[in-house]
Every structure is written in structure tokens, then in C-alpha cells.
Amino acid sequence: MLVLKTTVDNIREASKVIKNGGLVIYPTDTVYGLGCDPFNIVAVERVFKVKGERKEKPLPILASDLESIKKITHINERARKIAERHWPGALTLVVPKKPVLPNIVTCGLASVGVRIPNHTVAIQLISLCDGLLVGTSANKTGEKPPRTAQEAAKQLGEQVDIVLNGGPTPLGEESSIVDLTSMKPKILREGPVKLKDILNAL
């Protein structure tokens, strides 16, 4: 495991590791994320193994922009309105997925959680990884999501290839998750964005 500062060269190095099937811990606006190429099934399997005890819990995907999200999801008018109001930011939207995204990522579900983080380093890294990156929190399942690179390294350290240290994350709590697969928006996890904020966007 390499712990690197978030310089342009090191972010580029981390993107190469991801493209070669590696795992990288990186900062986001919420908590530190554990990333890999969502289209690399072996890498995705490794993420599940590193997280541990995560059966049937899908992996969220972070994107650099809305166009990248459209590659793997069906974004309807309602989802687009919410996205315009709250992205980039701490809101994950669960929307129908396209067949191009491997089923292992979503544990066989027909939907996927996606968001655009409000964090320069995360966006730079995701952009270098063709716009999409697995964005699960960099902790063991059931443990506290890490706010710092040190906390993340302590939990997952030797099981990943690179840790990008970008200092403490601004929010320090996981994103809100809203399910938009049925007519009525459903909050799956309460976080920085509240249900009233979602309804206001609509």
C-alpha cells in the first residue's frame, strides 16, 4: 500500500492503478471512498472481499458528470430536476440501471445508486477513470466510515493499492440516499440532504 498526497501526478498514478484493476482509497466531500473500475468484475469482487460481510448490499457509483451517469442509468425528468439542484453534492440517487453495468455491482438489482461528489480530488480521479468509479465508503462493513486517510488506512490498509491523502473530508458523514425507482421518492438513508430538500427540487 502506498500513501500519497493528492498532487496531480499522484492522482494520475492512482487512476492508472484503477485502470489496471487495482483498488484506491480517495477523499470525497462526505467520507473517504474505496474505488475501483465498476466494469472490472475481478476488481469489484475484490472490493466486496475487502469490505467484508456485505452480501446483497449494492455498491454505489460516483461520476464526474451527468453525461457519464447516463452511460449506466436511465435518468428521467424527475431525477434530472433533483440532480440539477443537489449535484455535485452529498446525495445519492437510486435509479434504473442499464445492462452495460455488470450485475455484480448492484447484487443483481435493476437499479444503481449514483452521485457526483462535490470534491475536486474525487472529480479529478473519476474523470481520469473515464467518468465512473465505485464509490463505497472505505471501511469494513459495520465499522465507522472514515473522515481521514489515516482512519481509512487503519481499517483497509494492506488490502488496497493506493491511499490518496487529501486531508479530512468536509462533511464527515455519508450521503443521503433517495430511491427514485417508484413514483414516490423514498429516503433510504438520511444524511446532509433532507427529504424536504428533495421535494422542493421537484
Image: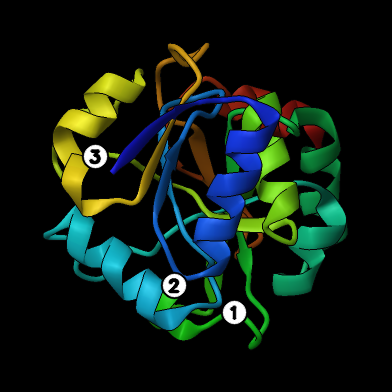
Q: Where is residue 178 in the image (x, y as percent from the top left)?
A: 55, 45
Residue at the (63%, 88%) spot, across then down: 99
Q: How crowded is mark 3: few (under 14 residues within 10 Å), some or many (20 or more)?
A: many
Q: Which comes before the other along the chain, label 2 or label 3?
A: 2
- Give the SS element for disc 1: loop
Question: Which residue is at the front of the view, 79 or 169?
Answer: 169
Residue at the (54%, 29%) spot, across then down: 28
The residue beneath circle 3 is: 139
Marks 2, 3: nearer the viewer: 3
| Colour option used | rainbow
The residue beneath circle 1 is: 101
Query: Position of 158 compared to 96: left or right?
Result: left
Q: Position of residue 136 (x, y in %)?
A: 40, 48
Q: Quadrant of the N terminus?
A: top left
Q: What residue type is labelled 1?
A: Leu
Query: Position of 73 compared to 33: left or right?
Result: right
Q: What residue type is labelled 3?
A: Asn
Residue at the (46%, 84%) spot, across then down: 103
Q: How crowded is mark 1: few (under 14 residues within 10 Å), some or many (20 or more)?
A: some
Query: Position of 127 compared to 190: left or right?
Result: right
The residue beneath circle 2 is: 105
- Give the SS element for disc 3: loop
Indicate the quadrant where residue 72 lies.
Answer: bottom right
- The answer to whether the residues at label 2 and label 1 have Cβ atoms under 8 Å apart is yes
Q: Spatial distance from mark 2 to mark 1, Cα to Cα?
A: 7 Å
Q: Spatial distance from mark 2 to mark 3, Cα to Cα?
A: 17 Å
Q: Which comes before the other along the chain, label 3 or label 1?
A: 1
Q: In the rendered view, would you say 105 is above or below 196?
A: below
- The answer to whether the residues at label 3 and label 1 have Cβ atoms under 8 Å apart is no
